[in-house]
Image (cartoon, rainbow, N blue to C red):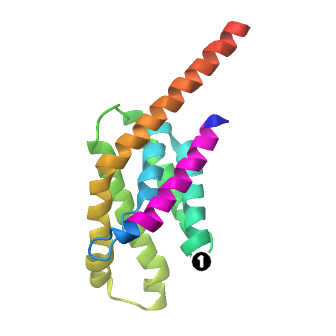
Amino acid sequence: MPRKIVLAVLIIVTFLLQSTLFQWLSIASSVPNLLLILTVSFGFMRGKKEGIMVGFFCGLITDLFFGNLFGFSALVYMYIGYLNGFFCKVFYDDDIKVPMLLVAVSDTAYGVTVYVLQFLLRGRLQVFSYVRHVVFPELIYTVVLTMIFYRIFFKINRILVANEMEGQRSLWLRK
């Protein structure tokens, strides 16, 4: 139960940072996708099930406030969380290279998916302009901030795991 509360607060705080502070700190009219970093991080650290859950709620909050097609971001984030959950088996404690690579691939896939399903199907064929002005700047900004935010998410996850282990140990001792 405490894990779910902490994750809910983490999603809300990350969303607020992305939609307020980092809107003000935009570079080249690009804002980092902090919710994507959160989804990738928890999918990578905890597996497919947690990746789907975190991805769904990150996408849902994005759809509620910014989406013009309700459920689109929730679905895309769920898939991203699920696919990153496959890499849980190669999770190493303080290795930042794998999460950065996963965030880069996931952000690129997110940008391409948004372009294909929301722009290309409407006949907007400026793919290179979209990649150059939207996908690439967001990708760079998001990957750079992964170095900071992944470590924060990693420490929070480590605390949650330690609390879960302590709770299981005390439950085992009572039996």
Q: Residue at x 29, y 51 (%)?
A: 101
Relative vertical location of residue 68 with respect to residue 153 in this rendering, above or below: below
Give left or right: position of 51 versus 127: right
Give the position of the C terminus as an image quadrant.
top right
- Any magenta on residue 10? yes
Mark 1 crowdedness (10 Å alpha carbons): few <14, some 14-19, many ≥20: few
Foreground of the two, 42 or 84: 42
Can residue 74 be seen here? The reply is no
Badge 1 is on which residue? 69
Foreground of the two, 85 or 137: 137
Give left or right: position of 46 versus 126: right
Residue 2 occupies quadrant: top right
Per the rendered image, the range of residues in magenta is: 3-21
Q: State the image coordinates of residue 23 (x, y, percent, origin top left).
A: 39, 70
The residue type indicated by label 1 comes to Leu
Give left or right: position of 173 versus 43: right
Residue 57 occupies quadrant: bottom right
Q: Outermost residue, right direction?
A: 175
Q: State the image coordinates of residue 50 (x, y, percent, origin top left).
A: 56, 43
Give the position of the N terminus as an image quadrant.
top right
Relative vertical location of residue 20 with respect to residue 115 in this rendering, above or below: above
Relative vertical location of residue 148 with respect to residue 169 in this rendering, above or below: below
Q: Residue at x 27, y 82 (%)?
A: 128
Q: Residue at x 55, y 50 (%)?
A: 54
Residue 68 occupies quadrant: bottom right
Give left or right: position of 10 versus 134: right
Q: Secondary structure at mark 1?
A: loop
Q: Outermost residue, bottom direction?
A: 123
Q: State the image coordinates of residue 29 (x, y, percent, origin top left).
A: 31, 77
